[in-house]
Amino acid sequence: MARSSISLQDVAREAGVSPQTVSRVANGSTAVRAETRAKVEIAMEKLGYHPNYAARALKSGRFNNIGVLLSHMSAFGNARILEGIVDAAAEQGYSTTIHTLDNLQDRSLSGALRLVRDLPLDGVIVIMERDFTDFNQFKPPQTFPVVLISEEPANNCVTIDSDSYGCSTAAVDYLLSKGHRTVYHIAGPSSSRAAQSRIRGWRDTLAQAGADIPSIYIGDWEANSGYQAGLALAHEEACTAVYAANDQMAYGAMLGLQAAGKRVPEDVSIIGVDDSLEGMVPRLELTTLRLRFHDVGREAFSMIKRQHNGEKVPPGIKTVIPPEFIDRGSVRALRQP
């Protein structure tokens, strides 16, 4: 029998059950006894039968498939968010289709969705790293859920992210509480929304405390840029505390400070963000704020699924996943003169 001609009725005859029973098994129904399900699955395997998922979707109104749009899949945060989405989707019997935005010419959310409009998807999660031109004007299709992983809440979309602004306030508050008069900042690239949020949190917290606001050192998320910043910061007489926008730059800065003759934390305290070096650097001694990227991904999938099931998830409000403070000893109280 040609594989393409195998029908649901053929499987039913092979398994000795009704076509309705085969249909229930193919559609994942729980109203089938385990031994009957096993017979049907064996018959499907023997005959090479595969359910017609397009026909199932037309009947049920769902594909059990979620789209994810992002750039830079190798970036630590993106990879962990994606892992959370895929894990949560698999647990619920959903597949995940990934599409990159690297070559997107139309820098709009509408343009991004056009990349996947013809794919069998129940909704799309967009991991935003840069601005879209229609961010506050975009309205998702009424029957097609869209969730943005974004630093800012969108007017018409459901939004979630880790708390980059809150990371900065927590880091700066902690360093000031240890007696440091100000905190120097090694920022991420200006094109990054997360980097800009962390700058705002750093600057606002210093201003609210009445502390001096030093010049910013701009990095590129890589350890080498942190190392160069550390070499420069070693010559700043007022620098006793450094907050870096991610752990790679923080670790690079630590090495740069040490190469220039400064001790960490005896002379300069330092805090990073994201906890991306755990398991990669032996005897890691960098205090950090762990971002729960995996939880962000899982919750983003939950938001898609809830909307697809008809639940109202309000737009215009950002759901924030707070960071977790990890003390590894790179901060010390400033000795007062």
Image: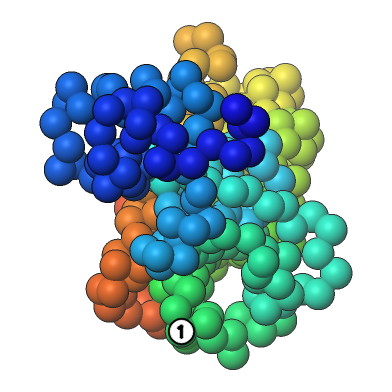
Q: Secondary structure at mark 1?
A: loop
Residue 88 image point, x, y percent: 36, 43
Numbered disc total: 1
What residue is shown at x 66% (from left), y 84% (from top)?
134
Outermost bottom residue: 137
Residue type at the position of mark 1: Gln
Residue 87 image point, x, y percent: 40, 37
Looking at the image, residue 249 sits to the left or right of residue 272; the answer is right
What residue is shown at x 71% (from left), y 31% (from top)?
223
Q: Nearer the viewer, residue 9 or 242?
A: 9
Asked which quadrant contains residue 190, the reply is bottom right
Colour scheme employed for the rendering of this structure: rainbow
Q: Nearer the viewer, residue 325 or 150?
A: 150
Q: 24 above or below 38?
A: below
- Can residue 259 be seen? yes
What residue is shown at x 53% (from left), y 27% (from top)?
48
Looking at the image, residue 214 sits to the left or right of residue 45; the answer is right
Q: 20 above or below 281?
A: below
- Can residue 291 be seen? no
Residue 315 image point, x, y percent: 39, 80
Is disc 1 surrounded by few (<14), some (14 to 19) or many (20+) residues within 10 Å? few
Which quadrant, please, contains the N terminus? top right
Q: Nearer the viewer, residue 249 or 84?
A: 84
Q: 157 above or below 186?
A: below
Question: For mark 1, what is the residue?
Answer: 142
Which quadrant, please, contains the C terminus? top left
